[in-house]
Amino acid sequence: MPIIEPTYKPPFYFKNGFVSTVYSGLARRVSLKQERERITLNDGDFLDLDWSYSKEKSNKLIVLLHGLEGHGQRPYVTGTAKLFNTKGIDAVCVNFRGCSGEDNLKYRSYHSGATEDLEAVIEHVISSKHYTEIYLKGISLGANLILKYLGERNTIHNQIKAAIAISVPCDLYGSSKELHKIKNKLYHDRFKKHLVGRLKIKQQKFEKNLSIEDIKSIKTLLDFDDVYTSKAHGFTDALDYYEKCSSLQFLNKIKIPTLIINALNDSFLPPECYPVKEAKENSNLFLEMPKYGGHVGFVDKRNVYYNEKRALEFIEESF
């Protein structure tokens, strides 16, 4: 499809990508009542789902996936949930394994390509609820996961009608290289600190899989993916993980209306993460590249972000 012309005009101070990214990650607040449900996965592990509902019973649901080291209460997912609830659509914010405030049971956890866990959530929703229309929206890592999920399968559930991917690092290796640059040192170090902190807790339960010396060897996010992510999830190394889980290679096979919004001043994304060619060649793929927005920093009026409004508009326009 033709590239979508963005209409995003942020307040002056939020034209700066660093300011919009940091403000949205640390300062934004969204008040939302949620109900938690725990589901058991096929391997005996668990996922926690945080539900919020429209005032009236709905047959429509949006499934929301967070980013790296996020969770179901982060404003970038609860903001969407709250907006959709006001429009008669229920919402479920998925907490990836180990992200709900309690370490998961297995040595493995979550990663950018763990589509089997998304499938488990969707199957649970379809079997236990009464939703005839399901929409998917992912942020960053969660966005890559959704795009991979939609493109790697020959068929998807009929109930899934549309998807939205925000600030998506669809080329994982390219995005990794960006995160390791000096311009992103603050982000890189913050991510690494949180990831290594949780890994130290996991090491105490799985000493045979991971040693203290292994953890001490982690100096960068690439090291983390080499030492833990790849090995815990069946990949040879970090580069093998990036290659097999990048959603860019699956975009041409997406068969439902799917919107990607990647800001041009997102410091996490290399040129490869703006899939113009793929969008032009796939009638189901829509690409919007606002000049501003940073990484998940689409600040807008009344605490409803531009990407949240566009997600709702895209779904309404698709039907």
Image (cartoon, rainbow, N blue to C red):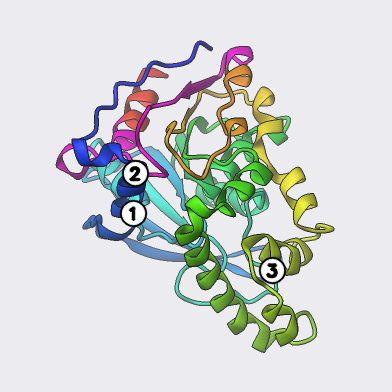
Query: Residue 96 at what x, y percent from top left?
Result: 54, 61
Q: Are marks 3 and 1 in contact (CB under 8 Å)?
A: no
Placement of 119 over or under 301, stated as above or below: below
Q: Nearer the viewer, mark 2 or mark 3?
A: 2
The amino acid at mark 2 is: Gly
| Mark 1 secondary-structure assignment | helix
- Sort mark 1 into few (<14), some (14-19) or many (20+) by Cα contacts within 10 Å: some
Residue 229 position by quadrant: bottom right
Q: Between disc 2 and disc 3, whose residue precedes? A: 3
| Mark 2 secondary-structure assignment | loop
The amino acid at mark 3 is: Arg
Q: Are marks 2 and 3 in contact (CB under 8 Å)?
A: no
| Mark 3 secondary-structure assignment | loop
Instruction: Find residue 108 and name its label.
Output: 3
Q: Is residue 81 magenta?
A: no
Name the residue located 65 percent from the left edge and 89 percent from the top edge.
Answer: 204
- Sort mark 3 into few (<14), some (14-19) or many (20+) by Cα contacts within 10 Å: some
From the image, tell me which residue sits under label 2: 297
Query: Residue 54 at what x, y percent from top left?
Result: 26, 45
Q: Which of these two is toward me, 314 or 144?
A: 144
Instruction: Find residue 22 and name its label.
Output: 1
